[in-house]
Amino acid sequence: MTAVRVPGAPIISDGRLVSTSPATGAEVGRLPVAAGDDVARAVERAREAAGWWAGLGFTGRRERLLRWRGVLARRIEELAELMHAEGGKPVPDAIVEVLTAIEHIDWAARNAGRVLRPRRVRSRLILAEFTGHLEYQPYGVVGVIGPWNYPVFTPIGSTAYALAAGNTVVLKPSEYTPVVGQWLVDSLAEVVPEQPVLTAVHGLGDVGAALCRSGVNKLAFTGSTTTAKKVMAACAETLTPVLLEAGGKDAMIVDSDADLDAAAEACVWGGLTNAGQTCIGIERVYAVEPVFDVFVGKVVERAGRLTVGADGSDIGPITMPGQLDVIRRHIDDALARGGRAVLGGAEAVQPPYVRPTILVDVPEDSLAVREETFGPTLTINRVRDAEEAITRANALPYGLGGSVFGRRRAVAIARRLRSGMAAVNSTLTFAGMSTLPFGGVGESGFGRIHGEDGLREFGRPKAVTRRRARSLLPAMTFERTPADVARLVKVTKLLYGRRR
Ligand code: NDP
């Protein structure tokens, strides 16, 4: 059978997933599709490796993960070129992505022991004769399902933390970026040749679905909200715990005392980097009336300077060909409802590229304001004041990140955004700060990667109490006497009975 090739659209040929460049259609690689019980077998092998990996302890794993970090750092250009070839991402953007991923591997490796290792926990007066012990034990095998838009940063955000916590990982990369996913697996195998602590299973959505049902001990998913719901439903069948990093529609608020040049620069970067195909990308901007016109002018001037094309351009192709229709529909809908294009517009979609498009005065109920566009487009709407901006920013079911530009009120506004993360006077920066948790609320998912919370996400808390002396107040025994119970009542009133 001869398949019609749309550049970038993956096809399966002779049991292999063929990955192509969205810009040129050139083949980037082909990988065996997981069929039959391949996924189950990969999970089984990962389970066998899990005992060995956990047995290395925090120190042994740290040493291996730091060596992996070193491989990525030394081969950063090679990996960035591959990301460019497979997903169309401009090489400088790919470099920034890999750097961020490297930082996460480094932090997870160095901090897993401190955060997760066994420790003694203070007891309280009512169980004073006991000590408490707490540790975070690995789950075993973690399944990681990743998207195509950040094919290194997103899987590593789960994988590095899961590995550091002592789990092994079976990764299902997106069908649009399987070659990059396999590169990550192979690079780790260079420094951990003994056991398959990270393996990949390739294929379409059905392979991801099989991974959910494969008996993995936890599933970390990054992708769209629609798929996140399917993943959660599949995992519910076996009560497999899930971590869901789903879509977003992040807003930026520009307050009256903002540095407008800095805000415009960050807005263009936050909205249009990676051709706008960023889960935490800025898609909607609310600028207060007094600064609206000047701000829009500065954004248009900067966005208008960006180059669009295959090699060496600021904005590359749209990775997933089907997304072009979504972007076109959002622009058309915004214009049909009275919005204005002050840059780009209906003609901006020129497959596989989309030219930067800035839409203003777009009705709040239009697609471009309410749904994930995932293209180099921005809506900028005027608001009376910061209060109205917050109300509008919080009006959607999504809640991933966000950004605020301003001075006096900026941090207070950021705290009131209904989102898991926010950046003040910058955009997207929380993704690179390995000490901070990353994740959303509402339709953007739940659970956290990165930081201490991200490490704990991949360990089961194990609580142990240990008796160290005879009980003065016997409570949990049939051998307590009526006098003991009377004493318990007395102590309860003494300790907890105060009115305040
Ligand atoms: P998708 O939800 O389409 O796919 C994500 C992954 O799930 C892919 O590997 C996909 O495989 C797989 N998959 C598809 N169907 C199923 C299924 N039924 N069961 C299990 N797995 C399945 O998302 P995209 O790849 O299009 O990524 C873009 C989305 O990801 C955007 O919504 C973006 O906002 C979000 N995202 C969220 C991030 C976050 O941290 N919150 C970060 C980055 C992106 P296949 O590709 O083979 O279909």
Image: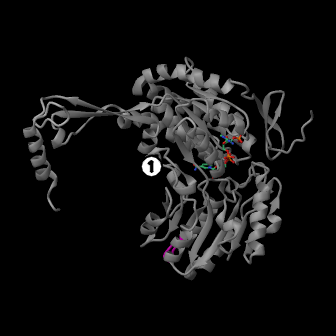
Residue 100 part of the magenta segment: no
Amino acid at circle 1? Leu
Q: Is residue 254 visible?
A: yes
Q: Disc 1 marks which residue?
A: 436
Reply above or below: 382 against 212.
below
| Percent x, y of residue 158 | 54, 39
- Most common SS among magenta residues: loop
**Which residue occupies 59% across, 20% down?**
45
Callout 1: SS: loop
Q: Which residues are magenta?
A: 254-259
Q: Is residue 78 visible?
A: no
Reply above or below: 59 against 356.
above
In which quadrant will I find the C terminus? bottom left
| Percent x, y of residue 313 | 74, 53
| Percent x, y of residue 166 | 46, 29
Residue farthest to the top, as pictured = 194
**Which residue occupies 73% across, 44% down?**
87
**Which residue occupies 45% across, 34% down?**
109
Q: Depth check: give the residue in front, 455 or 365.
A: 365
Residue farthest to the left, as pictured = 483
Question: By what rule are the colours in the image chosen?
Answer: one colour
Q: Depth check: give the residue in front, 87 or 444.
A: 444
Give left or right: position of 337 versus 107. Answer: right
**Which residue occupies 69% across, 70% down?**
366
